Image (spheres, grey):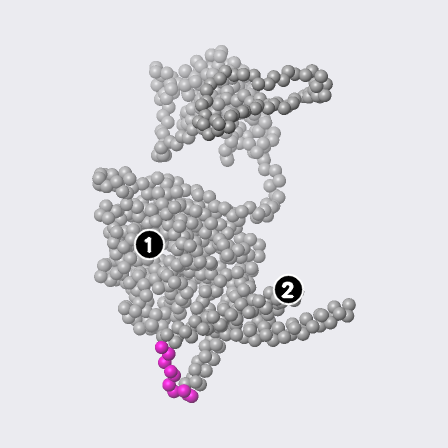
Amino acid sequence: AEVEETLKRIQAHKGVIATIVVNGEGIPIRTTLDNSTTVQYAGLLHQLTMKARSTVRDIDPQNELTFLRIRSKKHEIMVAPDKEYLLIVIQNPCE
Amino acid sequence: MEIIYVYTRKRSEFGRPCSFSDRPAKVNVDIPPDPSVASEFILRNPVDSYVQHTSDMSEHEVNTERVEVESRGVNHVEGGWPKDINPQEVEQTIRFRKKVEKDEHYINTITHLGTLMEHCVKQNNAINIYEEYFGEEEVAEAEDEPPSAKTINVISKLTSFFNVLLSKRDPNVTKRTATHLSWHPDTCKKLAVAYSSLEFQQNTKDMSFDSYIWDLENPNKPELVLKPSSPLVSLEYNPKDSHVLVGGCYNGQMAYWDTRRGGLPVEVSTVEVSHRDPVYGAIWLQSKTGTECFSASTDGQVLWWDIRKLSEPTETLVLDVTRKGLLENALGAVTLEFEPTMPTKFMVGTEQGIVIACNRKAKTPPEKITSTYSGHHGPVYALARNPFYPKIFLTVGDWTARIWSEETKESSIMWTKYHLSYLTDGCWSTVRPAVFFTTRSDGTLDVWDFLFKQNDPSLSLKVCDEPLSSLRLQDNGCVVGCGSKLGTVTLLEISSGLCTLQRNEKTLATAMFERETKREKILEARHRELRLKERARSEAQETEVEEKPVESPHEVLNRARREFFEVIEVELQRRAQAETQCLRGKVPGMGRTQPQHSLPWGRGHGSASVFQVKDRAGEEAAAQGEESQLLKDKEEEEEEKDAA
């Protein structure tokens, strides 16, 4: 359906290594990676997103977290949070 | 309009005590406003006025207790699945997933998030927002920043927890001096520190003998505890094998450790053949097997060891300057110095202030001592060769640090001023040829840059309140570790200006050292000539007069006093002449070079005083000659004035 199309489109972009959808409990719903790596990413990023969200809220209660980007030496991890789900995309920003 | 208040008193009432009484307020003067004056005033608009309204603030300080941090790993096991679903069962998980995907909320969310994500992904692909622009521009040579150093880490032994267990009544934590530091040869992240108490016979019973190897990442707890049978005074990593360390003990024994085998020494030398005093210097030698080292101690011996067989030394040398090999005459050694590029030569700094240069490969023991350099008043605590100019070496002792050249044996070529506190340790910078570091017993670390300034250190840092006892520079030249008397090791990072090689620095430093060496040589030659002349003269006198009248001490004193006053008078006269010459506008060209005035540092050589007295006498003659010349000039001047 639409969901499939959206995810496929994202995966087809240049440099994208993986796409993961995680639900509110940290369970990966859709993934393009192997299970163990997915589980690792899901658990760690879920906690980090929670922390980031609470940080933004603490600083300004009217503010909320819209997007989280972690750029590392090897690639960039992008997290789009929602109340219940998380969309995680790992991209290699090639220059 | 005057306001006067009249106070009257009868003369008969003068001197009487005052009796004050209360009185209600009374209006003395009442000046009503006069509207006619108002026209002479100008209305002021706008009027500046300030208002402050802020909340009250108060300042508080909070300091938390030190938190012990430990790194641990977590094993993330798949969890979070609802209770009825077994995560191992593939079918169940697939079913669950499919169910979630049918959820409408899920579809909406993902669509929304998808667009957001796509935006960012495309953004990433379009432009690299972290690109370095202007990366090829050269770094401007802004070396105007003042040299500085900042503390990066302080390692202090927390012996409190361990002493409380041993002796609950004794509240003192026996602090021991950090006597020697050695950096790990490869990584420079580990530091081996030898702790011992160098106070004579002040070892309390509960003082521990341990020395530690610290990992810089974890300054709270030592990485390895070395447990010798007696406290270690010196400790060195083997430059070839970074797991092996050799340590010299307080009781004279030598021990070696292998870090892979734990904290107890692998082997200890036997007491009968070891030193009889604390081993102050222990250095590894350059050998094919990488197992040879040598040690020196204040008992006057230098012993060579092979660590595979520590039951007896392979070679011994007695530091007897008279070259007779007698232990009674031997000088106690306090520091050792060895340069791997010159494997047969080494130098020893002694308690008596003499530096002995020795050759290991000499045939007979007396010939092993090649030369001696004396100049310090107290023990030579540190001895280091300049890594760029092996002929130049630095000695640190008593209140000064001196730079010597191997060729000039009579005195050092350069020296620092006399400080107010003892200098305890020193070393050259590994990166810049004219920079060296010294530590003082008032807790200060000095960084000297001899090309830039010789009177004062370029940077003087107060590291702690107690005396600093040891100093060691890391191989990169940027980080220096200093150990203090109470066992605290402080690591400092030096500003980049002091640890990067400047342009022309090598040539300038070479020129400076050569110039100073030449100067000393000239002075030495002159000194020798004078001595020869003296000797010749005294010999000539002896042939004439066989018996020289022996002067009584009283006469000697009188003669000394007379000579002293003569010298002072001569100097005063010379100064007066110099002043008058200045007044006349002539350049006081005292033909002779006056080395004692053109150099910024003092000459404290007793042996040169004879030379100075003679020089003064010579100058007086020259001055008188010039005085007559100047008188003639003055006459000429006056003639010119008359003519004009």
User: In the rendered view, would you say A54 is above or below B439?
Assistant: above
Residue B583: image tag: 2
The magenta span reads B543-552
Mark 1 element type: strand
Q: Position of residue B357 (x, y in %)?
A: 39, 66
Q: In the figure, is residue B543 to the left or right of B225?
A: right
Crowding around mark 1 (Cα neighbors within 10 Å: few <14, some 14 to 19, many 20+) is many
Q: Label 1 near label 2: C-beta < 8 Å? A: no
Q: Position of residue A29 (x, y in %)?
A: 44, 19
Tag 1 subunit: B
Residue in the picture at 27% in, 55% down: B200
Q: Main secondary structure of the magenta part?
A: loop
- Give the residue furthest to the bottom: B544
Residue at the spot of label 1: B234
Point out the frontmost of discs 2 and 1. Answer: 2
For the N terminus of chain B, the quadrant is top right
Q: In which quarter of the view is residue B216 placed?
A: top left
The three-letter amino acid code for the residue at tag 1 is: Ser
Residue in the picture at 34% in, 70% down: B321
User: In the rendered view, would you say A49 is above or below B304?
Assistant: above
